[in-house]
Image (spheres, rainbow, N blue to C red):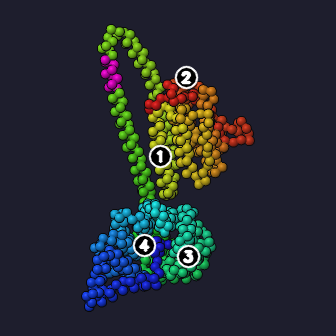
Amino acid sequence: MEQRLLKCFNRTNKRLAFFPLLFLLIIAFGSCNDDAVTASVSENISNKPVATDSLVVDQLIERSNLFFNETGSKAEAYDAFLKEALDIAGRRGLVSQEAIIYNTIGKRYRNRSQYGEALKYHHRALKLAQSIEQTRLLADVYNQIGVVYRRTDDNAMALDMHFKALKLAEEVQDTFNISVSINSIGNVNFNLGRYHTAIEYFLRSMELSKVMKNSLGLAINNHNIGECLLKLEQPDSALVYFLKSLEYNSEIGSRVGQSICFNSIGASYIAKNELELAEDYLERSLQINRKLGDLMQVSISLGKVGEVNLLMGNYHIARKHLEESLAMAAKIGTRFQAEESARLLSVLHEKTNDYRKSLNYFKTSTEYKDSILNEKNMYHLTTMEAMLDTEAQRDRIIQLNQETLIQKSVMGRQRLMLTIIIITLIVLIVVATMLVLQHRLRNKYNNLKNQHKLLRSQMNPHFIFNALSAIQVYVLEHDIEKSTKFLTDFAKLMRQVLKLSHYDYISLKNEGEILGYYLELQQLRFMTPFGFNIHIDPSIDPHAILVPPMITQPFVENAVEHGIKDLHENGFLDIRFKQVNKQMIIEVEDNGVGIHHSMQQKNDKTKSHESMAIKITKERLDVIHNDSGGKVGLEIIDKKDVNPFDHGTLVRIILPVVEQNTSKSSTNG
């Protein structure tokens, strides 16, 4: 149900509201023959001109709405009442009322499917609302713009507009616009095929409508829930909500709402295969929509009437309605309806053995469908590329700064070395011997550090590739809400990884945070996420104890991907850090299928992928051993080998304890 239903008016109240304007005009007319009255009225107007003009503008807007609702499709969107109101508001500086007028005109053009004109006037209203920082008005304008984008199938822009409106409405506790925004976000989810999520939003909006005793809001949300249930192939449940919506629309006298309900009830009866009853409701909807002049709703009704006649075998009637629906949808740019009408025409011509036309309409339907999917994919791709480009630029700046500092440091050391050589010329042999020894030791240490960095640089692309593969799932499913959250969380994680991967050692606290971010991202990939726990022994100071960065991540990833992935909510991952004497013990334990069973199921490519991660980790441990001289170790245990009734895998990593103030706690990348 469209956003334009959200501001129906009580006609009796509007007729009464016009009397103050009429009263003012009578006084003004009478003053032409009475100088005393003229002086009195002039004095009153001079004292409160803005208040009087504001009242006149309000009355003109209400009169325009009353006339527009009574006249229907024959009325002008931008009529004489609004022109006069806009002239007064412009001359007297009534900016908020100017914005309201432009917003009203935009809604009228939108309801006639003139979306270009609608956006033009809505953006004028937006500019004015922003200039006076009127939050409630701004939220309303954003919602109206979002409806236009939703009607033209630009769901990404629609979602952005409605979220902006929701944020503003929540700032000022504007319950009405909060309800509208939540309902609209539900509609975007409906367009994207996320029906269960859409129902959640509609139920939230319905609760707010109940609190406000807003019959229109209740009508809209009941109808929207019914549409979701119909898409979920529950026509009987959908009919219950459609009939509730029809009851509310009849109560407030909304012809638009009634037509939409008739259309949806007809669709439900089609799903129940009660075609004659469906045709009756759909014809009633079509008659109302033709009178109202909303081309989008007319196109939808024509398509539904065509569909029910196609099912009843009335091919001539069906073709007439479907061809008109397709032409109208193509004209106003409603690709979803154009795709549906073209598909039904393809089926119709196939049933009448006109296979050439059937193929042509099938191609047309496919083109519309592909254009919708391509637009969504391009939006997600552009967003991802922009975020990655930004991160790359930041990394390049950091790298250049580091190179500059290194060059300055090298130049300083060279000058110092030259001075030392000149001053200590007498002890040249001794100094030369010391320098040679020092040079060899530095080279040996740098070789160890370079090996360590090389291994970490192998690990980082491996980690990034897997994380991007996870994000790709939501991009391909067109899940804008979760893919946007996924990208935001992924950017935070990458900043943390890129920041800390320059160091030989990082604090145990930072290692735990990286694992936490990574596992939270992994949870978003599953409909029913697994559980996990990261435990650091209380006897350990996580800020003082250091570990190599991302030493644990490959085994955490293997546990998720190959151990507990198929267990869903029953899967659990336990990561423990503890200190035994001078050794740091890291354990990664899962309750999955076990490493033996997992290796049997993997193909050669997956085995190579996992063995590479294990190989790199072993090489890193060798470098740590050569660097520190401490004991290192890696154990991978199938828990079933220890206890036949147990299942899962235990990975144990043994490292030397490195503290913040020791010589091994390097903080130079």
Q: Residue at x 55, y 65 (%)?
A: 204
Q: Earlier in the sequence, mark 3 or mark 1?
A: 3
Residue 624 point in image, percent of width and height? 53, 27
Residue 355 point in image, percent of width and height? 48, 71
Q: Earlier in the sequence, mark 4 or mark 2?
A: 4
Q: Which residues are magenta?
A: 410-419
Q: 567 left or right of 160?
A: right
Disc 3 to disc 2, C-alpha distance? 76 Å
Q: Earlier in the sequence, mark 1 or mark 4?
A: 4
Provide the residue designation for mark 2. Answer: 629
Provide the residue designation for mark 1. Answer: 492
Q: 495 left or right of 542?
A: left
Provide the residue designation for mark 3. Answer: 245
Q: Earlier in the sequence, mark 3 or mark 2?
A: 3
Residue 549 point in image, percent of width and height? 51, 35
Disc 1 element: helix
Q: Please, what is the dominant secondary structure of the magenta stretch?
A: helix
Tell me the crowding category of disc 3: few under 14, some 14 to 19, or many 20 or more residues within 10 angstroms, Cα based. Answer: many
User: Does the residue at mark 2 contact the one at mark 1 (Cβ under 8 Å)?
Assistant: no
User: Does the residue at mark 3 contact the one at mark 2 (Cβ under 8 Å)?
Assistant: no
Comparing 349 with 633, the one in front is: 633
Q: Earlier in the sequence, mark 4 or mark 3?
A: 3
User: Does the residue at mark 1 contact the one at mark 4 (Cβ under 8 Å)?
Assistant: no
Disc 2 element: loop
Disc 3 to disc 1, C-alpha distance? 44 Å
Disc 2 to disc 1, C-alpha distance? 35 Å
The residue type indicated by label 2 comes to Gly
Disc 4 to disc 2, C-alpha distance? 75 Å
Is residue 64 located in the magenta-colored stretch of the structure? no
The residue type indicated by label 1 comes to Lys
